[in-house]
Image (cartoon, rainbow, N blue to C red):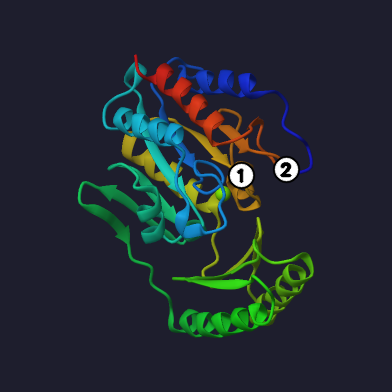
Amino acid sequence: MSEPPHGSTSDATAAAVAFAGPGPGGGPRARLVALDFDGTLAPLVDDPTASAMTPAARAAVDRLAVLAAGATAGGGVLRVALVSGRDVADLAARSSAPPGTYLVGSHGAETGVVTSDGVDAVPLRLTTEQQATLGALRAGMSDAAAGRAGAWVQDKPSAAVLHTRLSPGPDAAAAVAAADDVAGRLGLHAMHGKDVVEVAVVPTSKGEAVGRLRAALEQESGLPVVVLYAGDDTTDETALAALGPDDLGLKVGPGPTRATQRVPDADALAALLQALADGLDR
Ligand SMILES: [Mg+2]
């Protein structure tokens, strides 16, 4: 994960245009464009409830959704997915994603699709044991944040998240260490992201979720599937690591990654997605 991706934004855009082109055999392909939300389409902000896509990102996602509603160049199929750590209801509300968009929430524990009148979500069902563990987890994470300036805990349907974006360094470090202890005590995995530690009682990852979407699209379309995945955070690396040579992985912003291409921010990603749409819209 320490290998920096090669190339510039123009290399990344060229890779996106190639992704829009025909496959090795020249036949139609199904394309899955899977995008993280926060830090990828929406700039990171101190208040997660204020997060929103940039206007350029919004326009690019809306255009891809229009293309996804019909056949793309060469008789191909396109699907767009937002893949987030947010729970599905929160992701739907924050993104206002267009109908037809797949939603993957809670790092893969929840899935749904946006319809014209809401979200058709697959309900998350926890076992009795998972519910009990979630209760203990929430209490432990709340203790981890207590007395540490700026730290707070967000409850999600299958997880608890420690937020330390507003905490001074020593308070953040102490809260993170305490959260790691809680996870260890409960036998759960702690996912470290940008100023967050998330501990879930349902073991999953964005990589698993993208793998499920890929398999579903392959079955639905009967076509070979290629995947474009873009993300900014460590939790996106599971999805980037699962990509093959015909897929395209994009890292948004700085930091080590398994992605083969990088863009600096949401607006650069939006421009790349418009170039992809140009290639598909023929
Ligand atoms: Mg992100």
Rendered residue at 29%/25% (across/down): 71
Residue 37 vs residue 16, the one in the foreground: 37
Side of 25 where 7 appears, left or right: right
Rendered residue at 70%/23% (across/down): 7
Image height of 188 relative to 169, above or below: below
CB atoms at circles 2 and 1 under 8 Å apart?
Answer: yes
Q: Position of residue 156 (x, y in %)?
A: 47, 69
Rendered residue at 41%/43% (across/down): 81
What is the distance, in whole Å, between disc 2 and disc 1 at their CAs?
8 Å
Which residue lies under the disc numbered 2?
Answer: 255
Image height of 171 relative to 21, above or below: below
Whether residue 27 is visible: no
Rendered residue at 76%/74% (across/down): 174
Determine if the C-beta at disc 1 is less than 8 A from ligand 1. Answer: yes
The answer to which image quadrant residue 90 occupies is bottom left
Residue 232: mark: 1
Q: Earlier in the sequence, mark 2 or mark 1?
A: 1
Local packing at callout 1 (Cα closer than 10 Å; few below 14, some 14-19, many 20+) is many
| Dot 1: element | loop
Q: Position of residue 200 (x, y in %)?
A: 55, 69
Query: The residue under label 1 is which amino acid type?
Result: Asp
Whether residue 166 is visible: yes
Residue 141 vs residue 217, the one in the foreground: 141
Residue 67: mark: none
